[in-house]
Amino acid sequence: VNCDEVALKIESHLDGDLSEDDSRALAKHIAACSHCSVRFAALLQVVEALEGLPEVTAPDELVSDMLYRLPAYHINAADMLSRSATRVRWALSFTGAAASAVIITVLAAVAARVPAWWDSLGAVGRVVARLGVKGVVWAGETTGTLAGTCGTPLAYVLLIDVALLSAGFIVMAMWRRRHTPASVLLTF
Amino acid sequence: MVQGESTTIDPPAADAASPVSAVARRDLQRTVAAALQQLSDAERLAVVLKHIQGFTYEEISAMTAVPVGTAKSHAHRGRRKLAELLRRTGEEDAS
């Protein structure tokens, strides 16, 4: 056993990782080797002094501050920025959805109550309308039918439009960003 | 415990083997605590967690997100530095 190996054994011993047999061999070497005995004594003195020191305890403010921060632990500044950007996007989307709902509802009201206007578009006009603004006209027709045939008040039709569009956006957002319905609502 | 096991190996050096008074032990602890400030952050963290807080290297590794071997070598290097700093302090006091 040379002194370099013993140096490693001393470290293991101080870590509490050395077996009984190895400890005995180490003790034998140290008893015979002044170089290793000095090294061991110096390190043992350090470890014993350290173990006599009081444990470090965190101040109460630090603990409560850390507990307060824990849920936000993974959110760094960049995430916060992108979160607020997401919020702006959501606000815009929602405003857009609400605006489309109003437009659709107005169109629906017009189409339902002034069938002459719809007829006046003519066959070609209706095809162009269907192809060009198919979604809007479809929604307008649907909600218009709803308003016309069921006599649903305009405010309800508007609410249904908003609900349908919001549901669409929420589903789209859940699919694209793996949100839960609650987290999507919270971003508004 | 390391302390318990280490009593089985008595350093033959006359100074270290002699009984240390409570006052001298407190002085030594104060010196070691002061010397801790001269270690690198990683060494100090490993030494404090291992020998003052009494965590295992596995726990330290999990807490500080460094491999077990790295935590060990930080603690070992920190201990050697502390021993060297103590030796120098002793020499200064003697002179």
Image: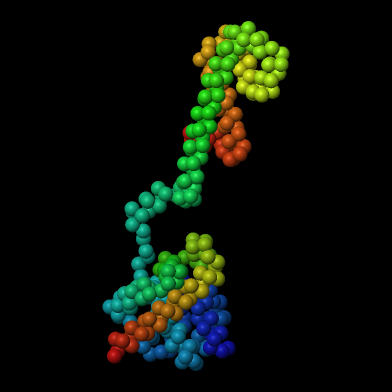
Q: Is A65 located above or below residue A14 in the figure?
A: above
Q: Of A136 and B95, which appears nearest the observer?
A: A136
Q: Which residue sits at x=47%, y=41%?
A: A84
- Answer left or right for A150 relative to B6: right
- Answer left or right for B20 relative to A143: left
Count how many numbered circles sit on residues in the image. Answer: 0
Q: Quadrant of residue A130?
A: top right
Q: x%, y% of residue A104?
A: 57, 19
Q: Quadrant of residue A56?
A: bottom left
Q: Is residue A47 visible?
A: yes
In which quadrant will I find the N terminus of chain A? Answer: bottom right
Q: Quadrant of residue B67?
A: bottom right
Q: Is residue B54 visible?
A: no
- Answer left or right for A187 relative to A62: right
Q: x%, y% of residue A34?
A: 46, 92
Q: Of B65 and A30, which appears nearest the observer?
A: B65
Q: x%, y% of residue B57?
A: 51, 67
Q: Is B77 located above or below residue B52 in the figure?
A: below
Q: Of A157 and B65, which appears nearest the observer?
A: A157
Q: Is A181 located above or below residue A164 in the figure?
A: below
Q: Which residue sits at x=49%, y=63%?
A: B64
Q: Is A112 located above or below residue A79 in the figure?
A: above
Q: Of A145 and A117, which appears nearest the observer?
A: A117
Q: Which residue sits at x=37%, y=85%?
A: B87
Q: Which residue sits at x=45%, y=84%?
A: A40
